[in-house]
Image: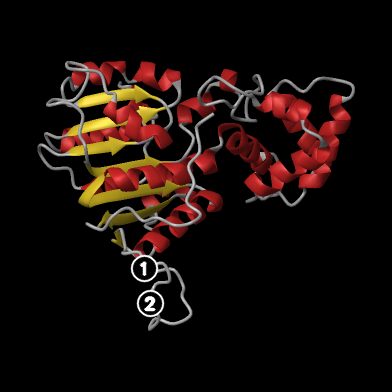
Amino acid sequence: MAPDMLHHSVLLQEVVDALGPTDGHYYLDATFGNGGYSRALLERADCCVVAIDRDPDAIQRGAAMQEEFAGRFALVEGCFSDMSTLIKNLPPKPHGLRNGAPEKLDGAAFDLGVCSTQLDQADRGFSFRSDGPLDMRMSKSGTSAADIVMQSDARDLAQILWEYGEEKASRRIARAIVTARETTPITSTAQLAEIIYSVMPSKKPGQIDPATRSFQALRIYVNRELDELASGLAAVESLLKPDGILAVVSFHSLEDRIVKRFLTTRSQHAARPSRHLPIADGAVPSFDLVARKAVLPSKEECRVNSRARSAKLRIARRTNAPVYMSANQETVACG
């Protein structure tokens, strides 16, 4: 069985239907993972897909798909915030797309969840459910979660846990981490989880594991996920053709807040003092919202795949307006 078939891509049907793949058109799978979106697009139409992933393991898993869909599929390693450069520098045929790399895209999909393969591999250090090195690096390079836990002071640790995990007990957990590392280096997921459990109430039926928010916070911080998302959305805006579709699946409020703010600003649905007042900066909407509210997974999908329960899909269509520019627009480099 192909790897992508072992991994259930959340809201797969809804994402593919939104993009509406058409013969001869070009699409971006900004978060390849196990290739669920890419495969579904390629099988739906005689189209071309460029996929991106920063995880070298994902690139290896996708090698077979590049052979299977030779000339129609290209998988490149890197951060999706760098998509403009990555697409421009696609290798030549037969490993690239037919007729060369596209200048513009007809659609783009983002699945912002952690790949289930990463979670299931203890040696990647993403999950507290199995013991492994406290790593969490999607790119397998740079600063690890263990580095952050061992080197940050209590104040900085608490800020990370609060800002990126919305953990109300962030200060208590941070103090416990600093105290524990004075006697023993914290290098494994099991060690960190036990420290968290020691200062948190026991899990009650229906509640999330007490370590969930802290592990989420460290993963987001290590991989700069929120900065990467903001920059990736700005980058894809410049690559989509007029009428090109953007579909983004998020899994927690921090991600969804960024996506929602981006799309409401770009579509000018953000709150204003009066609907009769002009837009202050004179910007023309660069997106139209396909749906004002997020699309949620069905009850059946949530029953089959518990990972889908928190998912939200937001869909927008690119207009023919220039790329939206604001005084605060920034870009970041992937770590």
**Callout 1, which amino acid?**
Gly
Q: Dot 1 surroundings within 10 Å: few (below 14), some, or many (20 or more)?
A: few
Q: Quadrant of residue 74?
A: top left
Circle 1 residue: 282
Q: Is residue 222 above or below residue 290?
A: above
Q: Is residue 95 above or below residue 263?
A: above
Rendered residue at 55%/51% (across/down)? 254
Q: Quadrant of the C terminus?
A: top right
Whole-percent x, y for residue 217 in the image: 64, 40
Image check: 171 left or right of 31? right
Pointers 2 and 1 in contact (C-beta within 8 Å): yes
Image check: 56 left or right of 90? right
Q: Is residue 246 above or below residue 291?
A: above
Circle 2 residue: 278
**Callout 2, which amino acid?**
Pro
Whole-percent x, y for residue 290 in the image: 28, 61
Image check: 97 left or right of 108? left
Q: Secondary structure at mark 2?
A: loop
- As measured in the structure, the alpha-carbon distance from the residue carrying label 2 to the one carrying label 1 is 7 Å
Rendered residue at 33%/35% (across/down)? 84
Viewer can see residue 278: yes
- The one of 301 and 29 positioned closer to us in this rendering: 29
Q: Quadrant of residue 92?
A: top left
Q: Secondary structure at mark 1?
A: loop
- The one of 93 and 116 positioned closer to us in this rendering: 93
Whole-percent x, y for residue 118 in the image: 50, 26
